[in-house]
Image: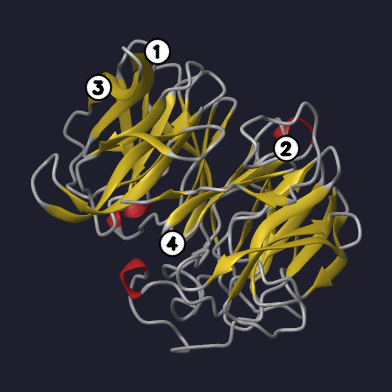
Amino acid sequence: MVVGLCTKYLGVQHGLNVVVPSVALFDPHSAQLLASRELRKDGLLGGVYGYLDEHDRVVIAEGHDIVRIGYHNANGRWVLTEETRTPLPDLGTDAPMAGVAPDGEDRVWFATKDSVVGVIDHDGRVSTARLGGGAESIANGLTGRPDGASVLTSHALYEVALTDDGEVTTSWRRDYDRSSGRKPGQLSWGSGTTPTVFGENGQWVAIVDNRDDSPQLRVFDVATGADVCSMPAFETSGPGTENSIIADGATLWIPSTYGFDYPPLAVDGPSVPADAPYTGGLTKIEVTAQGCTRVWENNTRIATLPMLTKKDHTIWALSTGKADGSAEHEVSLIGVDAETGAETHRLPIGLQPFDAPLQLTGMITPAGEFWQATATRLLRVGADAGTGTAPSSYSPPNRLSSSGATFQ
């Protein structure tokens, strides 16, 4: 089954409201919508980062409650049901949630947009701490680690953990260059990256800062916060990113979103400069204890959160326009060789604005099918998409599902 967090343009379950988040269940073969459950709107667009637990339930924040939503078939009809709800104690803030993530002990970490970070332990006890003295905000998700979480605010990267006494503590804090304002192609002022924990046994954590002239890749030792390496994130691509860094072993791939045109309601404040051309770009960097080395950089226009399939070592994403920069309204699924940076696949799937990619997050299934939301629908792409059967082994996506689910 395929589960997603969608945005409904009109919600009615909790009173008439616009731009309301909802959990949605989709048919794994046709991509048709099977069930939908609205969440109470919280914040401008209402959405928040969540995850699936070991029972395939969506773990997500609704207001200042943590809810788990499961799915089941009742008399031939699929339904989404709230299975648990954990009301949080007074957090000292009315700010909406920014993210929810598990750590390696299956504890639930959460963060509000004004930088209150907390954790729910196995006994349901909640511990919290405020980062940055109330002067910092969180616009991206948090990343769970074996014994804590990595949290990136508008000013600094934090490593937080739970002490033996049940208190949230900051293991270390590292400031970063947040620049003179929000860049075009980013949603907020500060780094646009959710922390990426990588390397052998997750010993490193990487972000891209927001330096004005040349954003820097910053890699730190998870245990100590010591610098591992730092270098310009891009050389020829647009100087900024809102997307997380892909990691495999000690290798990183960083997409550029500089100049990407987000919907006005999605961004927080004016950008500096007010506008910029969207050039795109993707770069590969190898990390060692001795430093960082750029392997290649290309001009790929990444328009969704890119994903790596390790079996064929290909990076997949939606892209706007053709490789030569023409046909701006064309939207295509592309594959990029992770070793060389060369484009290996290109499948036109739609046209803007109907299929505007909006830097949304997609999914690749174990069967090798590519699922991706656009501005108005959900697409399933696979070697046999549209036939009603899943491939028995991985093969590159080459057909578009005959019917995608149109969002409500």
Q: Is residue 117 visible?
A: no
CA gap between label 4 and label 2 equals 23 Å
Closer to the N terminus: mark 1 or mark 3? 3
Disc 2 marks which residue?
Answer: 368
Q: Nearer the viewer, residue 167 or 236?
A: 236
Disc 1 marks which residue?
Answer: 122
State yes or no: discs 3 and 4 in contact (Cβ < 8 Å): no
Disc 4 marks which residue?
Answer: 375
Residue 229, quarter of the rendered image: bottom right
Q: Residue at x 37, y 53 (%)?
A: 132
Residue 369, quarter of the rendered image: top right
- Residue 20 image point, x, y percent: 24, 50
Q: Amino acid at mark 4?
A: Ala
Q: Amino acid at mark 1?
A: His
Closer to the N terminus: mark 2 or mark 3? 3
Closer to the N terminus: mark 3 or mark 4? 3
Closer to the N terminus: mark 4 or mark 2? 2
Identify the element where label 2 is drawn: loop
Closer to the N terminus: mark 1 or mark 4? 1
Disc 3 marks which residue?
Answer: 85
- Residue 112 image point, x, y percent: 31, 46
